[in-house]
Amino acid sequence: MLWACSQPKPEPEAAPAEVKPAPIEIGDAQLIEISKQSLNALRDGNIDAYAANFADNAKFYWNYLDSLVGKPAIVDYWKERRTKVLDTLIITNEVWIALKANEAPAPTVHAGNWVFSWTLVTARYNSTGKEMTQWIHQTSHFDASGKVDFIAQYLDRVPIQAAMKK
């Protein structure tokens, strides 16, 4: 008993240091499902369902520097494209990942929730009946309310233009 009293008291444990989240981490898988449903609606020509989860101020950019600003402009573009230009869309070999950027990695890149997709797309064109197939990469950012407010789509216009030429 005397020995127990002579032992030094253990030091209280220091409060754990606050752990800073990683700059980028795996995101919410539910956002992938929302994005897949949207893409399937585009494939099926249901543009209202395609854009259902878009913010009113959404922006749609292509890698060749063209863009659409605002949900109405995006909806109008895709309704026209799916009814008058594209006969069918076939989407295969899908790869999806959701990421959460805890800090903006660059001045032009938003922090928050992102979904990235790579899909093999075959499109048949109304005017020629020709098809083109290519990989298309898309990035989608979700705002704080869970709506898509930014899309960037990366594709090659050369095979598209070739398939549209008679």
Image (cartoon, rainbow, N blue to C red):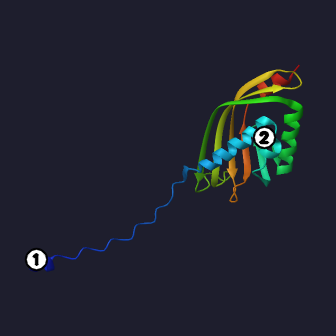
Q: Quadrant of the N terminus?
A: bottom left
* Residue at 76%, 40% in the rendered image: 41
**Label 2 vs label 1, nearer the camera:** 1
Q: Give the secondary structure at mark 1.
A: helix
Residue under circle 1? Answer: 3
Where is residue 130 shown, x and y percent of the image?
A: 82, 20
Left or right: residue 123 compared with residue 142: right
Tell me the kind of residue under disc 2. Answer: Leu
Tell me the kind of residue under disc 1. Answer: Trp
Location of residue 164 (image quadrant) = top right
Q: 151 and 93: which one is in front?
A: 93
Q: Is 128 above or below relative to 80?
A: above
Residue under circle 2? Answer: 65
Left or right: residue 136 compared with residue 44: left
> Do the numbered discs 2 and 1 sit on residues whose CB atoms are within 8 Å?
no
Q: 105 and 52: which one is in front?
A: 52
Labels 2 and 1: the sequence-earlier one:
1
Q: CA distance from mark 2 to mark 1?
A: 79 Å
Q: Is 5 above or below relative to 110?
A: below
Residue 64 visible to an observer of this rendering: no
